Image (cartoon, helix red, strand yellow):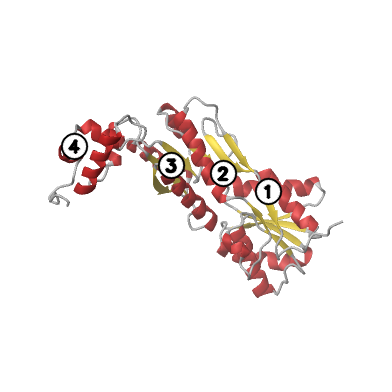
Amino acid sequence: MKENLTEKRVTSFDVARHAGVSRSVVSRAFTKGAIISDTARAKVLQSADELGYQVNYLARGLQTKHSNLVGIVASALDTPYRARQVRIAAQECIKRGFRPILLTAESAVESEKLTSLLFNYNVAGVIITSAEPSSKIITECNRLSIPIVMVNRGSDISGADCVQMDIDQAGALAYQMLNEAGAHRLAVLMPRVESYSVSGRARAFVDICKKHKTPALVFTSSDQSYTAGLDAAQEIGPSIDTLDGIFCATDLLALGLLDGLRHNWNIKVPENLSVVGCDDIEQASWCSYQLSTIHQDADEQAIAAVNIMLKRIEDPTMATQTYIQNLTPLHRGTTKRPIRK
């Protein structure tokens, strides 16, 4: 039966008094790896349950060097791939005994400000999937011994651990898939706003096309969304007779482009045009699209980021880690079936 302590918040002092132990014993009972007897821990947990006590992890973090809070700074949460990536990262943090704080930032300036804000909470680590922060922020993380992991933010970031897709492989796979489908008059659709992975994979595609003496036309969109792909169809439509294959730097762009070309230009895919996307979001496999795409595993990236962060917490002196994720080509209904020799 719970005591009537509704007039005020139940504190660790209340639990200690109820259990007949010191406050330090209460603290150890809720600290992973702390030395405490099974009997003492059972008494504390029983008293905490009876009183309705909740650990104030924020206060605990401010009193110690680090808390069990992890900052996740993310952008573009309206995109299916990023939303899944962040969700899996948060779930993995919780599974490992940490509590994620999600902050959204759509620019490098916002990312830097929000990452600085996390320092006030003595976070145990930071995972960044938004715009790359400045070297100043990374230096500050290193000074405070706060692990910082960048996901798809770049390969030459000094002082931070990285998890990223292989952008050169993405460009090469897109060319290979279109070539296997018999497409040789190629184009790429990419957003005007620069980003490491999306812009990088598009440029890698252009480079591989040049290497094979098959120059690719470059079309740009306002961003990497479905609507941007739909709008881009109006520009690409008049040039469609000169193309038989196009690589869209994201699946959302590809889905928008497909709808725009089919409904406004009566383009048949893949009969008239082969289309390849990148990411393999859930919508790509929907019956109305069956988009051929390049699979990058959001779950694998998120779990890798958390694993590296935890390793750095355990060993702050370990060498900087870079996890490169391999990609998988997926031929579906928007490319002609590869001809097997």
Can you tell which mark lies on residue 152? Answer: 2
In the picture of the structure, the residue carrying the numbered disc 4 is 16
Sequence-first tag of 3 and 2:
3
Sequence-first tag of 3 and 4:
4
Residue kind at label 3, given as amino acid type: Arg
**Which of 22/228 is in front?**
22
Can you tell which mark lies on residue 96? Answer: 3
Mark 2, other Cα within 10 Å: few <14 / some 14–19 / many ≥20: many
Distance in Å between CA atoms under marks 3 and 4: 27 Å
In the picture of the structure, the residue carrying the numbered disc 1 is 170
Q: Which residue is drawn at 25% across and 35% down?
A: 40
Mark 1, other Cα within 10 Å: few <14 / some 14–19 / many ≥20: many
Label 4 vs label 2, nearer the camera:
4
Secondary structure of residue under mark 2: loop
Could you tell whether 177 is left or right of 87 in the image? right
Sequence-first tag of 3 and 1:
3
Label 3 vs label 2, nearer the camera:
3
Distance in Å between CA atoms under marks 1 and 2: 13 Å
Sequence-first tag of 1 and 2:
2
Q: Residue at x 75, y 52 (%)?
A: 175
> Residue 248's spot in the image, x, y percent?
66, 57
Q: Which residue is drawn at 75% across and 60% down?
A: 245
Sequence-first tag of 1 and 4:
4
